[in-house]
Amino acid sequence: MNIPRTELPRVVIIGGGFAGISLARKLLNEEIQMVLLDRNNYHTFQPLLYQVSTSGLEPDSIAYPLRKVTRNSQKCFFRNAEVESIDAENNIIHSNIGELVYDYLVIATGSKTNFFGNESVEKNAMWMKTIPQALNIRSLILENLEQAVIETDPEKRKSLLNFVLVGAGPTGVELSGAIAGLRNNIVPKDYPDLNPAEMNIHLLEGLGRVLPPMSEKSSKKAQKFLEDLGVKIHLNTMVENYDGHLVTTNTDLALKTETLIWSAGVTGAPVKGLNASAMIEKANRYEVNAFNQVNGYENIFAIGDIAVMQTEEYPKGHPMVAQPAIQQGKHLAKNLKKLIKGEKLEPFDYFDKGSMATIGRNKAVVDLGKSTFGGFFAWFIWMFVHLWFLIGFRNRLVTFCNWVYNYINFDRAARLIIRPYKSNKENLETNQKKI
């Protein structure tokens, strides 16, 4: 990896998500050598991925170069690498660009999309966990609209204009609301020969209400906001199969669609090599103690979505959202300094800052302690919080300007098919023709 040898303790961080970048920034000026590794050379602000997928923002508005994190320190390094395994016995990590010895290892690899073993859905559905996947969704939505304009077969046209989203958590709610906004505000202007009423948005949820992690009051408000936007909500409905054209469920509901977007859950993204006792197999995540040390290891830590810290208040671990990851990253930085100095470690104590979701223009819900509110004020708070936590002044400025433009003009400036989307099936057919 071409990392200089050093007498300083070497801390290796795997993953540049919220947890990894939060830790890295706090270690920049310490007497250690820090190495940050990630398969991408940028940090993704995942809460705004849905806006990229619905033409509200360009991808560079929510991406931040990871080299900017390490560039002001001579003792800190970034490598664009994918870690393949960990040799904990010899304190070595193996990656696609070489090996690296560590003194302390921090795993912050986050989570990946969970299809709960449904192979047909995994093969044919649209994923939305990364920027390339969000761009795929953007391209497919716009391509479907372009195709629908010239389609003469009513059934095929209906299938192109049916958008099915699975999972009514914050991602599914925000994305379905954004697609509804696209239909209500953009389609009438951009596609005058297309009847917006033909475009249907279906939101499927396996449980009995939308936004299950939030309060019942927020759930009811969110459902009303979505229904007012014209989103069709199907509760207690689980997808059983999707072949790329037809969605079948555990109910009588069957939907013909060319677009199924999966946002029904996530699972951990661990690295191979650690003992089975370190893992909570069902969650696919590492079990950690109150200091974020992985079970069975003193010098290996896990933070963020990949870590399960079981407490009385959180028996299944902390929520897999940004705030626990950010707070664990900052706290671990303090504990690593203590550990190197031989001082006593402090247990992590999560401060719940509340949860929120936006449903569209002037509509959002917020749970803050025992208080719950929705509407314009909640929407304003949602915007302020997301701008505040965006990394980089440029990203905040560009995002704010885009939001102001979109709000005033009822417009989405980024509705461009830069990279036409091809499904896995289409890619396979193209490759076979080349052969």
Image: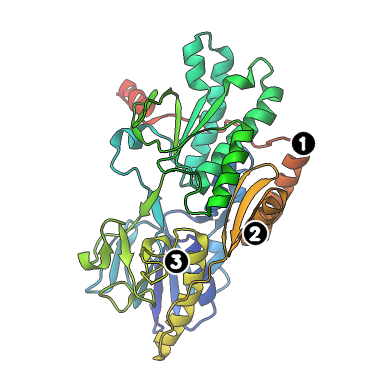
Mark 3 or 2, closer to the camera: 2
Q: Are marks 3 and 2 in contact (CB under 8 Å)?
A: no
Question: In the image, is residue 10 above or below residue 318?
Answer: below
The residue to which callout 1 is attached is 409
Q: CA distance from mark 1 to mark 2?
A: 23 Å
Disc 3 marks a residue whose amino acid type is Leu
The residue to which callout 3 is attached is 36
Sequence-wise first label, 1 or 2: 2
Picture coordinates of residue 132, whole percent (x, y): 48, 42
Q: Are marks 1 and 2 in contact (CB under 8 Å)?
A: no
Q: Does the rendering let one see residue 86? A: no
Seen at 56% across and 41% down, the residue is: 223
Q: Which image quarter is the N terminus in?
A: bottom left
Q: Secondary structure at mark 1?
A: helix
| Residue at the outermost top position | 152
Query: Is residue 254 shown left or right of residue 406?
Result: left
- The quadrant in which residue 15 appears is bottom left
Question: In the image, is residue 176 above or below residue 426?
Answer: below
Query: Is residue 131 shown left or right of residue 207?
Result: right
Seen at 60% across and 39% down, the residue is: 224
Disc 1 marks a residue whose amino acid type is Asn
Mark 1 or 3, closer to the camera: 1
Sequence-wise first label, 1 or 3: 3
Picture coordinates of residue 351, whole percent (x, y): 53, 71
Q: Secondary structure at mark 3?
A: strand
| Residue at the outermost right position | 408
The colour mode here is rainbow
Question: In the image, is residue 156 above or below residue 409?
Answer: above
Can you tell which mark lies on residue 385?
2
